[in-house]
Every structure is written in C-alpha cells, then in structure tokens.
C-alpha cells in the first residue's frame, strides 16, 4: 500500500485550519512523523500519530489514508477500508486511497470491489505499475487472462524491472499453454534477482515446465 506524506501534501492545510499555536500544543511535528511512518514508528504508533492529526484537522485526507495503511498492516481490514473511504470522501481524486482500498478489499476476498477501486485509481493515475500488476493479478484469479495480460504488459512498460509482473505474466502464459513465453518471462524475472521466496517459486515453475532457470 501507499502512504501519503503529510508534510508535503497536507501540512499547509493543517496550518491554515489550526494555526501554529494549536499545532505546537499538539506536538504536531511528532504526530506527523509517526503518521508518515518516518523512522521506526510501528503500526500502533502510526495509528496514534494519525489519530492526533485527524483530531486537529478532521479534513486531512492523507492522515486517514495513512491510518488506514497502519490498520492494513495489522490486518484490521474493516477499519482500513473505513479510513480509506474517509480519505476518498474528503478527496474524491485521491488515487492512492482508491489503490489502498483495493488492496484491502482484495485481502478480504472482495475481488469485485477491489477491481472497481483499481479502475478508479488507474483512472486518476495511469502511471502506477503496481496498480496495473495487482489488477491483473485479480483478473487472473477470475480466469480473465486476456485482460490480465494487458495489465501485466502495461505494468512492465511502466517498470521494465518489475520482477513480480514478469512472474504474473508468465503464469498467464502458462495457463494459456504458451510455454515458451512463460519460460522467457520466468527467466527474465530471475535475472532481476527477486527475493529468495520468489526465486524458489519461479525455479519450481520452470522445473515443472521442463526448463532450466
């Protein structure tokens, strides 16, 4: 998921609505740092920091988004979805909040709602390769392989070093019986040096196709 920067995106709005005195009394710099998840802030500390910011500025969409992200990290998806929804209500053009809510809905198993939010996110920000990859993954789960391929292609166009997108595209090719293309994508993913878990998964997939890494 994505977290928004309060300092860059919303500090001016907070100052305008509260004034410097209120911000100082609330130790806003400390709360904002936690809400931004700067340093070593835990999810619980991020929730605390964002809640303090929201208490002072209930229209701070980034604070709701970031608190939702912390709830997401704690696997409290209902609260995460509620906070992303609050962020979207405050800022209907908030592509990151739509994207984050899509992720949370997907984790809850609500693929249709996730797809709707991926669509909204990409309609607002067509330059997010992760959104294309994750929407493609959801489409692949539904067996909509041609649409999934389009999304993985676009993700790779935006980020040519996106190992997971190559893996996912390889899985679609494998499902469609296009073995040579699947092998090429799996090998490309390995060349990008993914983490140990992904490497093991891809090597197994290649072995099942009778190909060497």
Image (cartoon, rainbow, N blue to C red):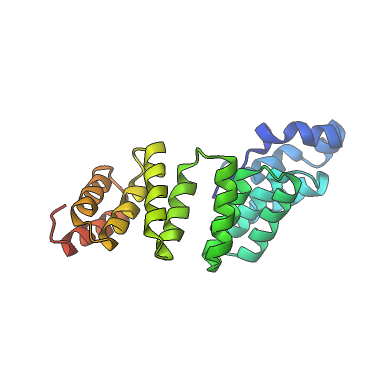
- At x 59%, y 54%, the residue is 117
Q: Is residue 196 visible?
A: no
Q: How far across and how far down the image is residue 120, in percent?
A: 60, 49
Q: In this view, does 47 lie above or below 6?
A: below
Residue toward you, 10 or 55: 10
Q: How far across and how far down the image is residue 122, in percent?
A: 55, 45
Q: How far across and how far down the image is residue 150, in percent?
A: 40, 48
Q: In this view, does 18 lie to the left or right of 145?
A: right
Residue toward you, 60 or 117: 117
- At x 60%, y 45%, the residue is 96
Q: Quadrant of residue 27?
A: top right
Q: In this view, does 142 lie above or below 19?
A: below
- At x 27%, y 45%, the residue is 193
Q: Is residue 213 visible?
A: yes
Q: How far across and how far down the image is residue 5, in percent?
A: 63, 38
Q: Which residue lies furthest to the bottom in this view?
A: 109
Q: Is residue 133 left or right of residue 67?
A: left
Q: Quadrant of residue 44?
A: bottom right
Residue toward you, 125 or 66: 125
């Amino acid at each position: 998921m994505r977290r928004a920067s309060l300092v860059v995106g919303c500090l001016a709005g907070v100052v305008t609505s509260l004034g410097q005195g209120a911000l100082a009394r609330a130790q806003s710099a400390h709360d904002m740092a936690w809400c931004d998840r700067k340093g070593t802030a835990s999810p619980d500390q991020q929730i605390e920091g964002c809640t303090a910011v929201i208490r002072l500025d209930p229209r701070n969409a980034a604070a709701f988004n970031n608190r939702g992200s912390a709830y997401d990290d704690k696997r409290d998806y209902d609260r995460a979805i509620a906070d992303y929804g609050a962020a979207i209500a405050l800022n209907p053009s908030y592509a990151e909040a739509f994207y984050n809510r899509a992720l949370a809905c997907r984790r809850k198993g609500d693929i249709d709602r996730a797809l709707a939010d991926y669509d909204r996110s990409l309609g607002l920000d067509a330059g997010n390769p992760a959104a294309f990859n994750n929407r493609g993954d959801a489409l692949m789960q539904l067996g909509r392989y041609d649409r999934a391929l389009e999304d993985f292609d676009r993700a790779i166009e935006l980020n040519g070093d996106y190992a997971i997108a190559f893996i996912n595209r390889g899985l679609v090719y494998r499902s469609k019986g296009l073995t040579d293309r699947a092998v090429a994508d799996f090998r490309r993913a390995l060349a990008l040096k993914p983490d140990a878990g992904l490497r093991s998964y891809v090597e197994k997939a290649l072995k099942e196709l009778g190909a060497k890494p």
